[in-house]
Image (spheres, helix red, strand yellow):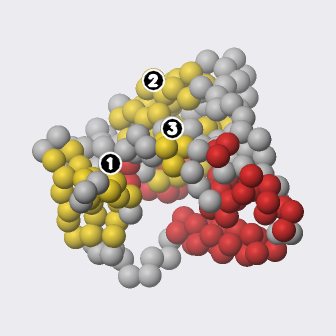
Amino acid sequence: MLVKWGSIIVRGSGKLGGHVFSSGPSGASVHTSARARNPQSKYQMEVRSRFTQFTQGWRNLTESQRDTWYAAEESFSRTNRFGDVVTLSGKNLYESLNTNRAIIGLGTLDEAPMPTTLLVNEMTAAYFDLNFNALKIDGVYGAGQKYVLMATKELSQGAKYKSEEMRIIGTVTARLDGVNVNVFGDFYTLYSSKFGRPTTNSKIFVGTYFINVAGQKGNISRQMASY
């Protein structure tokens, strides 16, 4: 749950208890969240496992190792959805950066890294070719670099994009020319194994984002898939 405090609460985003807070062109809203009891999907189990892993990992660090994370807090300040600068605690920074690194298959850092550059991540088009079981992505990416691929399930035609609908479906590597990601079958397999075969003209959003070796995460670039 993300809340912005004024003389009273002036804005909210996320979940609190059984409710979801959001804002849009018509103003702020709150609605009841319908959730499955004790969800056990593969994705959710991975999230829980990583949380447990890095919570325990923090406890096992030496004092001098933890001091490096405390010292790095200001270096990794970030801007939240409200445009405010947020500084994570040393423990939360350790968990956040190492969780991101785990997503792209990198090992755990016991000492805080230095911030490094986030590469370009600009998706310009995403489209399915169901005749060839293909999902194609065009965009501007870093040569030979690994990106995280996200997508939504099939949505109704009247549905608008909601970030909470996006799910990680795998990681992909940009073409060596550093200009376009144009590999066909691999992306389709990642999508269909997560959500099943899409139907013609269904509404699906696809996105990518970059994680660097320090574990910093870039913004999501997304497109609605065409056919």
- What residue is shown with label 3? 219
Between circles 1 and 2, the one closer to the viewer is 1
**What is the residue that sits farthest to the left in this orientation?**
26
Q: Is residue 72 above or below residue 223?
A: below
Instruction: Give the position of the C terminus as an image quadrant.
Output: top left
Confirm whether residue 153 shows in the render: no
Q: Is residue 138 left or right of residue 117?
A: left
Q: Residue 36 in the image: x percent, y percent? A: 36, 77
Q: Is residue 200 left or right of residue 159?
A: right
Who comes first in sequence, dot 1 or dot 2?
2
Who comes first in sequence, dot 1 or dot 3?
1
What kind of residue is marked 3?
A: Asn
Label 1, label 3: how far apart the Cα atoms are: 15 Å
Between circles 1 and 3, the one closer to the viewer is 3
Mark 1 packing: few (<14 Cα in 10 Å), some, or many (20+)? Answer: few
Who comes first in sequence, dot 3 or dot 2?
2
Q: Is residue 22 above or below residue 214?
A: below
Q: Residue 223 in the image: x percent, y percent? A: 39, 33
- What residue is shown with label 1? 162
Q: Is residue 142 left or right of residue 14?
A: right
Q: Residue 224 in the image: x percent, y percent? A: 35, 35
Q: Residue 32 in the image: x percent, y percent? A: 22, 70
- What residue is shown with label 2? 124
Tell me which corner region of the image, top left, top right, bottom left or bottom right, holds residue 66.
Answer: bottom right
Tell me which corner region of the image, top left, top right, bottom left or bottom right, holds residue 120.
Answer: top right
